[in-house]
Image (cartoon, helix red, strand yellow):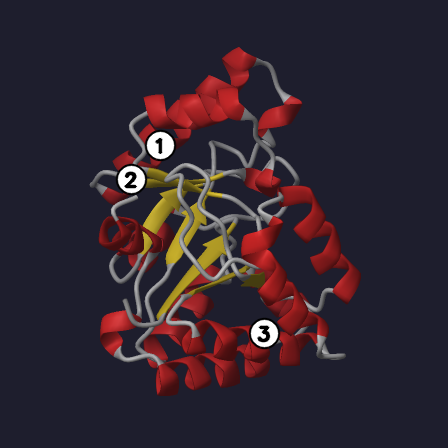
Amino acid sequence: MAAVFTCSIDDGHPSDQRMAELLSKHGLRATFYVPLKNREGPPVMSAEQVREVGQGFEIGSHTLDHCYLNSVDAVEAKLQIDCGKSALEYIIGRPVAGFCYPGGKFNRYHLDLVRGAGFLYARTTANLYIEHGKCPFEVPTTIQFYPHSRNVYLRNFLQFGNWHKRAAALKVAWQAEHWIDRIYLLFDHACRQDGVFHLWAHSQEIDRLELWPDLDDFFAYVASNIPPSGRLDNHTLARVTGR
C-alpha cells in the first residue's frame, strides 16, 4: 500500500467548521470525533453544525459529554459510550462507526464496552506510529498538531509501548528543534516508508494559538505529496487495512 494520510479532529468545538473548510480546500478527508457536550466547559457544535460537517466528513463518537472513562464507574462508562453513539446517530441520521477515547484514557474493560456498543473501531492518543496498528479498537496516531516539547514525545513513547515499532519515528522527530519541523519530518518519513501518517488536532487549540496559517501550509504540503486515493478518513482506512 502506498503512503496514506488520515486526520482526526477531537472534541466537537464550533471551530471544527473552520477545520472542515480548510480540509475541503485541500481535498483532504478526516474524521471528527464529537461529544454531545463537554463536561470540562468548552462549547461544542450544535446539532445543525454537526450535520453540516457530517455532509463532507466522517463523524465519530467521543462519549456523551467528553468523559474520561477511567474517571467513572462501569455503569457510567457504558452509558457514556452507548448514549453518545445513539444520540449522535440520531443527529446525523446514519450509523456511527468510530469512537475516540477522551484523553486517551481507557482500559481493557472499556475496549470491550466500545466493541459491544457496535463500534467498528476506536482511536487512541498513542503517537509515533506510521502504521494503522493491529487492534481495531486501539488505533494509534502519528503526531498531534500542537507545539509540544520533545520530552512529550518521549513520555508518549514510553507510555504506550511497542517501542520497536516506534523507535524510528521517535528518532526522526527528535532531530528537529522546532515542533512544526518535526511534523514535516515525520510526514516525509511516513511517505518514504509507504506508511500511514495519522495527524490529530483540536480545533480550539488551533484557534487559541493562531496556528491556522501553519496548518494551511501543512495541508497544502500533504496534498502535494499524497494523491486523492491515499487521503482517507479513519473508517475507510480501517476497512482498507482490514482492521
Mark 3 neighbour class, 10 Å CA radius: few under 14, some 14 to 19, many 20 or more: many
**Label 2, label 3: how many angstroms apart (C-alpha)?**
29 Å
Mark identifier at residue 223: none
Q: Name the amino acid type tagged 1.
A: Lys
| Circle on res. 96 | 2
Which residue corresponds to the image point at 46% horizontal and 18% vertical from the top-left? 78
Q: Is residue 66 above or below residue 218?
A: above
Q: Is residue 137 left or right of residue 228?
A: right
Residue at (52%, 54%) from the top-left corner?
13
Which residue occupies 56% across, 79% down?
184
Q: Secondary structure at mark 2?
A: loop
In the rendered view, tell whether residue 18 sits above or below residue 67. Answer: below
Return the x and y of residue 115 as percentages of the image width and height.
35, 27
Give residue 85's mark. 1
Residue shown at the point (59%, 60%) measured from the top left: 204
Q: Are the two marked residues, 2 and 1, in contact with CB atoms closer than 8 angstroms?
A: yes
Disc 1 on helix, strand or loop?
Answer: helix
Which residue appears farthest toward the front when viewing the image?
164
Give whichever of 91, 79 is nearer the camera.
79
How crowded pointer 2 is (Cα within 10 Å; few <14, some 14-19, many 20+) is rated as: many
| Alpha-carbon span between mark 2 and mark 1 | 7 Å
Whether residue 31 sits left or right of residue 159 in the image: it is: left
Screen quadrant of the C terminus: top left
